[in-house]
Amino acid sequence: MSNNIEKYKKDLEKLIKHGESLQIAMECECYPEQYEKALGDKFKEFKKKLPKFNDEYQSWYSEAKVLIKQLLPDRLSDFERHYEKPKPRKDITSDNYRIEDYLQGLSVTRGWEKEKVVGPDAAIPQFKQQLAIVKAVSSRFESSLFDIRQIVQADLFDSELEAARELIKNGFLRGAGAISGVVLEKHLGQVCENHNIKTRKKHPAISDFNDILKDGGVLDTPSWRQIQRLGDIRNLCDHNKDRDPTKEEVEELVNGVEKFTKTLF
């Protein structure tokens, strides 16, 4: 458990530090004169050390989304809203200008004199809010209300999949497939719980969880098909006596289960 907690903390600290640098870079891009006035001769060297917002924001955003989805899911839609352009949008104002607009360099002017209506600086408050949401995640590690069940579960899943790989090395393919299938089944059950999706079956299987997650809009069709395939391999390991599973099939199962336990929440 401690390994995963420490990993999350380190990832979070790195994200926050990177985000703070991106905020300074964004402000410097929007208000270079103010920064140059404040820093004088040191401005050029200072600017060189800053990240390029347009180059690095998307990777920061993608990484932050995964962390928020796992640890602060009730704020995920807020986080995304500060990036995505609202639809529909008849007029562009400082209230509905988003980071997506900033990345495209969008500015709106009025009349022959090109009077500024809204420009890239309107995205600064949006990014500040995103960074504030990321920082809010850190309080969950210190709060007595923090639910560590999923972090504990993640460590257990890692151990079980590691055990499955050892079984594959030693030729115990059905055993490796059975262990991986149990991990996938447990994880899909947790995902259903996270999204308040219920099944009427007393003992639902992988296919049952897979179907209701797709119906609930959590899974897209390609992911649903991938999980269906993993469930078929698991059944081959557990039930099919006509032929043994191949090593390649069981490795596909283990790798697929690992992928979904790390990316589906």
Image (cartoon, rainbow, N blue to C red):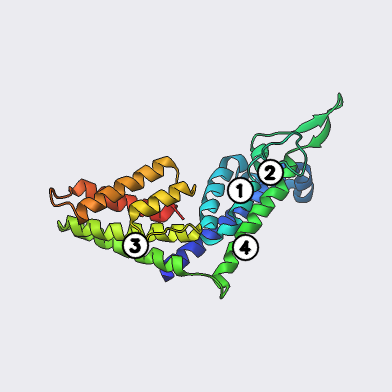
Residue 32, compared with residue 260, is above or below; it is above
Secondary structure beneath disc 1? helix
Q: Determine crowd level at label 4: few under 14, some 14-19, many 20+ residues with C-alpha closer than 10 A.
A: some
Location of residue 133 by image quarter: bottom right
**Residue beneath disc 3:** 203
Q: Position of residue 68 (x, y in %)?
A: 55, 57
Q: Mark 4 or 2 closer to N-term? A: 2
Q: Determine crowd level at label 1: few under 14, some 14-19, many 20+ residues with C-alpha closer than 10 A.
A: few
**Residue beneath disc 2:** 44
In space, the residues marked 1 and 4 are separated at their CA atoms by 15 Å
Kindly report which numbered mark, 4 or 2, lies closer to the viewer in this rendering: 4
Kindly report which numbered mark, 3 or 4, lies closer to the viewer in this rendering: 3
The residue depicted at 67 percent of the width and 40 percent of the height is 86
Secondary structure beneath disc 2? helix
**Residue beneath disc 4:** 136
On-image quarter of the N terminus: bottom left
Residue type for callout 4? Ala
In space, the residues marked 1 and 2 are separated at their CA atoms by 33 Å
- Residue 43 visible? The answer is no
In space, the residues marked 1 and 3 are separated at their CA atoms by 36 Å
Q: Position of residue 45 (x, y in %)?
A: 66, 46
> Marks 1 and 3: CB-CB under 8 Å?
no
- Residue 7 visible? The answer is yes
Pick the front one: 141 or 13: 141
In space, the residues marked 3 and 4 are separated at their CA atoms by 37 Å
**Outermost left residue:** 242
Q: Determine crowd level at label 3: few under 14, some 14-19, many 20+ residues with C-alpha closer than 10 A.
A: few
